[in-house]
Amino acid sequence: MAEVPAAEVPQAEKDELFCAYAAMILQDSSLEITEDNLNTLIKAAGGSIESFFPSLFAKMCKGKDIEGMLKFGGGGGGAPVAGGAAGGAAAGGGAAPAKAEEKKVEEEEEEEEMDF
């Protein structure tokens, strides 16, 4: 969506995005995701959407683990890499490859600094 100017995004998609962002804000604020709360937040943001969207979205979210959905896949993915490096170091061979890789990156940076 970042490649499409906001003026060219269809109104139905804007309505859906308003509801999705409002629902995430409500969840993050530990507030219930209801039609009234969605409407209040959307209006406070200066938006106006089709009247059926907040009702539909609130019904869709009711009884769902929104917190779990927002956390799914998060965390940046750094833990498995660090765990793998720690496991290799514990086996006795993890530190050397890391130094070699670090040296290679430094050499590439030096080459970039030279204006060829």
Image (spheres, rainbow, N blue to C red):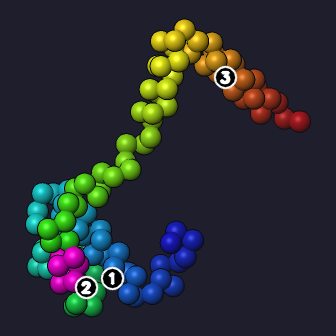
The x and y percentages for residue 24 are 25, 63
The reply to whether discs 2 and 1 touch (Cβ–Cβ < 8 Å) is yes
**Mark 3 and mark 2: span between their CA atoms?**
51 Å
Q: Between 90 and 29, which is closer to the camera in this rendering?
A: 90
User: Mark 3 Cα within 10 Å, few/some/many (few <14, many 20+)?
Assistant: few
Residue corresponding to mark 3: 101
What is the chief secondary structure element of the magenta stretch?
helix
Given the image, on which type of amino acid does mark 2 rest? Phe
In the image, which residues are magenta?
54-60
* Mark 1 element type: helix
Given the image, on which type of amino acid does mark 3 rest? Glu
* Mark 2 element type: helix
Residue at screen point 40% across, 82% down: 13
**59 in the magenta segment:** yes
What is the residue that sits farthest to the front in this orientation?
91
* Mark 3 element type: helix
